[in-house]
Amino acid sequence: MNNRFIIVCPKCQQDNGFDKLSNRPAACKNCGAALADSLPAEKQKTPVGIIITNQESNDNFILKFFELAFFGREHMGKTLFRPHVEISRRHFLIKLSKNQYYIQDLGSMAGTFFELDGTQTDCKEPVPLVDGGTIILGKDRFTVNIQY
Ligand SMILES: [Zn+2]
């Protein structure tokens, strides 16, 4: 089957692929959770990179064509982090899996949160990055733009 669309399971983050909208699955093939009609069915597309922008300074950081990247005081993105923020040496990572970027905290002091539509999710477990969402580290906020 040629999976032209995907629905990401809200419970286990599994990509549920299908070929046409009339074959939209009602339940996750991995965990069995219901896939509500309100969940977006997105066209399968491969992200080619990501732009992370500090919402206060407007400094941004562009990553192209990566599968795994570490962020922190001694890693990529360090120019985005203001000195007063409690940023750990290895604070969080972003990885690409099945056409989806995920963010995960690396046991940092301040933690890593992802905010979408006013809801914050703790990134202790991998959390799917959504275009237009916000990464929160302490008091600093960073807009995520996914490039396709
Ligand atoms: Zn599931």
Image (cartoon, rainbow, N blue to C red):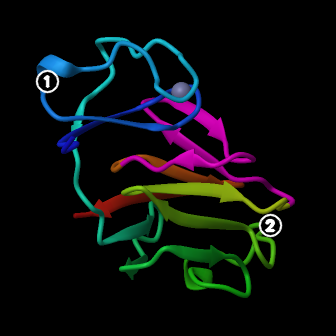
Indicate the position of residue 127 as horizontal and vertical percent values. 58, 45
Tell me what residue is drawn at x 56 percent, y 80 percent: 77
Using residue 113 as the reference point, say whether residue 46 is left or right of it.
left
Tell me what residue is drawn at x 53 percent, y 55 percent: 102
Q: Is residue 81 visible?
A: no
Which quarter holds ligand 1?
top right
Query: Quick one: 13 or 118, which is closer to the camera?
Result: 13
Answer yes or no: disc 2 within 8 Å of ligand 1.
Answer: no
Task: Rate crowding at label 1 as few (under 14), some (14 to 19) or many (20 or more) other CA atoms within 10 Å.
Answer: few
Label 2, label 1: how far apart the Cα atoms are: 46 Å
**Which type of secondary structure does the marked residue at label 2 adopt?**
loop
Query: Quick one: 45 or 2, which is closer to the camera?
Result: 2
| First-in-chain label (2 vs 1) | 1
Task: Rate crowding at label 2 as few (under 14), some (14 to 19) or many (20 or more) other CA atoms within 10 Å.
Answer: some
List the residue tagged with mark 1.
21
Residue type, label 1: Leu
Indicate the position of residue 82 as horizontal and vertical percent values. 65, 75
Using residue 137 as the reference point, say whether residue 61 is left or right of it.
left
Q: Is residue 56 visible?
A: yes
Q: Is residue 19 magenta?
A: no
Answer yes or no: disc 1 within 8 Å of ligand 1.
Answer: no
Using residue 100 as the reference point, say whether residue 31 is left or right of it.
right
Query: On the rendered image, what quadrant is the C terminus found in?
Result: bottom left
Point out the residue furthest to the front here: 1
Residue interval drawn in magenta: 109-130
Query: Quick one: 96 or 4, which is closer to the camera?
Result: 4
Tell me what residue is drawn at x 52 percent, y 37 percent: 13
Tell me what residue is drawn at x 34 percent, y 50 percent: 131
List the residue tagged with mark 2.
86
Tell me the quarter of the picture where residue 1 sits: top left
Tell me if residue 131 comes above or below residue 23 in the rendering.
below
Q: Are marks 2 and 1 in contact (CB under 8 Å)?
A: no
